[in-house]
Image (cartoon, rainbow, N blue to C red):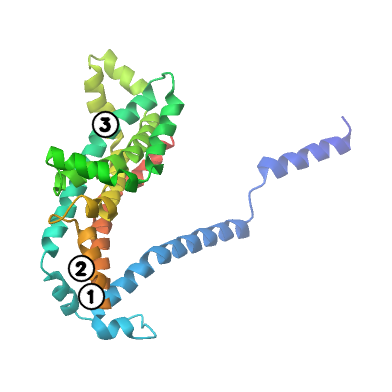
Amino acid sequence: MSVTAEKATEKSAALSGGARPPASFASARRWLFRSSLLVLCAWVLVPIYLVALGAFGGRTGVYAWPKSFLPANVSLEPFLTFLQTEGLVRAFMNSLGAAGITVALSILLGAPAGYALARFEFRGKNGFRVLVLLTRAFPLAILALPLTVSFIRLGLYDTVLGVGLVHTVLALPFAALVTQGIFMGVPRELEEAAWVFGCSKFQAFLKIVAPLALPGFAATAVFAFVISWNEVFAASVLTVSNRTLTAYLLTVLSESPLHFRFAGGLLLIMPSVIFIFAVRRYLFAIWGISSK
């Protein structure tokens, strides 16, 4: 090999792996990451902040322009007055009940389906995944009349349980697919080691797989809770007196002052934010498990 070829080889090796990126490139990457994070936080938090301003600012605060970053005329009185609306607390509790049913059933039914998709090979597996997703593409309005008739016959019409069952059907596709991804990230060798040490398949799932899959269960719970909490069509069709909060606000706030509408929007946002904050530890851990 000639001297020129040797120098060219050394130069290419230095460029490919030996040379470290310049400090300016690393600084640009950090600046881009922090800027993207700041934009994302602003995208999420600024609308919530403006809704809170409208809820606590009263009639004058809603129509004030330009909006000040630290408003001076903020009071809890408009929001507390809105909370005294007749039937609001009952609708709030109905929404919590329906969301709780949806979360519980989505995990109890979606986790076994996700485990089967992750661990077993069977004919039509890919087609089954597509069918699971297609259930979300089916318009719920077409099922409104059959569901109403069936629920009246079964005694589930105008009940929180009936609304929770419909919301569970809406959340199950997400539950099955999310838990499938989590179970695929849990090494199968851990289950086989538990079988060797005397655990049954069910005991190995409870003692080994389920604790490692807690982030996936938390993500499933968040999806199910948000879907149930925000759903309004089925809750409006299948209830009359036991309406959920979204269906109740849809009828009550149509003729209400604008600051009451902002108060209703804030009341809808707060439980979802609190629930996500409560399970944030498991949500942060989901990336480490799913990437294994």
Rendered view: 212 above or below 76: above
Residue that carries the numbered disc 2 in the rendered image: 252
Against 76, is 167 above or below? Answer: above
In the rendered image, residue 178, in percent from the top left (x then y), is placed at 36, 38
Whether tag 3 and tag 1 are in contact, CB under 8 A, the answer is no
Which quarter of the figure is the N terminus placed in?
A: top right
In whole angstroms, how far apart are the C-alphas of marks 2 and 3? 43 Å
Task: Give me the residue at 34% from left, 43% from top.
Answer: 285
Q: Earlier in the sequence, mark 2 or mark 3?
A: 3
Q: Local crowd at mark 2 within 10 Å, few (<14), some, or many (≥20)?
A: some
Mark 2 and 1 residues: CB-CB less than 8 Å, in contact?
A: yes
Please name the amino acid that badge 1 sits on: Ser
Label drawn at residue 256: 1
- Secondary structure of the residue carrying tag 3 is helix
Q: What residue appears at the point 44 percent right and 33 percent down from the top-left corner?
A: 130
Alpha carbon distance from label 2 to label 1: 7 Å
**Mark 3 surroundings within 10 Å by alpha-carbon count, few (fewer than 14), some (14 through 19), many (20 or more):** some
